[in-house]
Image (cartoon, rainbow, N blue to C red):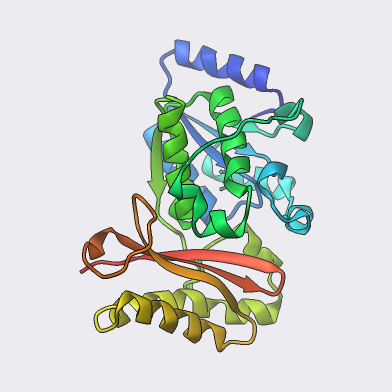
Amino acid sequence: MNIVSSKRELSEIINDLKVEGKSIGFVPTMGALHEGHLSLMKRSNSDNDVTVVSVFVNPTQFNNPNDYSKYPRIIEEDIAKLKSVKCDILFTPTKEEMYPEEDNREFDFGNLERVMEGKHRPGHFRGVALIVSKLFEAVNPHKAYFGEKDFQQLAIINRLNEKENYGIEIVPCPIIREKDGLAMSSRNMLLSKEQRENVSLISKTLSKSLEQSKNKTVQELKDWVISEINVNKYLDVEYFDVVDIKTLESACDWMNKNNLIGCIAVHVGSIRLIDNIRFYS
Ligand code: PAF
């Protein structure tokens, strides 16, 4: 595995590989890798000749400085995991490399950035768009892989890709879950033993909501999900909404049920977890 920290060196290596006719798959991450990330790399390996992974904890997407400082950074463990799945190039830039000067660009993602995560984490998606655009320009891959746990992020990145004409194929990959249903996330490793024992209620309630949706209105279902989770003293729902998979607009009824997704954010002490569930008729 080639470990590179300069954008210029990375672009040169990738250009040479492209001249040789190699296809390039890219998996951007913030490290603290888990099976969810590894599933994206495995998918990239099976689709492409070369897999590039970036590990960079992007300061501009954290609206809460405490969350940024606490975000797990375990690069040696990450490197061991990357070697176990085959990563050809690891890009680990410094903050100065990615932000040599202040980047004042603004993006307009319309409703996609105004709801759910966008509403509760002001500036978050601007930060994601800043870093993903820089990474896409440095790597210039044929395909890029993103997990569906961050469903709204995926919608924003698809829009960014269209707006900036990158021409990259964005490949959505399914959520990978722990045995008890908890969606895999780098933040899970910050949970205490007691918190960890309680958080599976989030995914269990989302699963049950499929059955509940057959005899409840959308509003009744939203209230039900929130109250089922909030009974647990470790959990505090920030939002649960049922939205259209393309526009992310809130649904008023179950018409077009196959295009609806339920998205949730839950505070567990100072840790914030997200998850989602697709509905079907
Ligand atoms: O999903 C993530 O880990 C991050 O938001 C991303 C896409 C790597 C940008 O920093």
Q: Position of residue 23 (x, y in %)?
A: 42, 24
Taking depth in this image into account, of 247 and 169 the one nearest to the observer is 247
Query: Which residue: 45% across, 12% down?
Result: 20
Taking depth in this image into account, of 112 and 267 the one nearest to the observer is 112
Relative placement, left or right, of 9 versus 232 is right
Taking depth in this image into account, of 8 and 241 the one nearest to the observer is 241
Q: Position of residue 168 (x, y in %)?
A: 41, 29
Query: Which residue: 50% across, 34% down?
Result: 26
- Dividing the picture into quadrants, the one containing residue 260 is bottom left
Q: Position of residue 61 (x, y in %)?
A: 65, 46
Relative placement, left or right, of 245 versus 232 is left
Instruction: Give the number of marks.
Output: 0
- Dividing the picture into quadrants, the one containing residue 126 is top right
Residue 83 in view: no
What quarter of the picture does the N terminus occupy? top right
What quarter of the picture does the C terminus occupy? bottom left
Please tell me whether residue 104 is drawn above or below residue 149 in the rendered image.
above
Query: Which residue: 36% across, 82% down?
Result: 220
Please tell me whether residue 257 is drawn above or below residue 219 in the rendered image.
above
Residue 95 in view: yes
Q: Position of residue 135 (x, y in %)?
A: 58, 30
Taking depth in this image into account, of 115 and 277 the one nearest to the observer is 115
> Image quadrant of ligand 1?
top right
Query: Which residue: 71% across, 23% down?
Result: 6
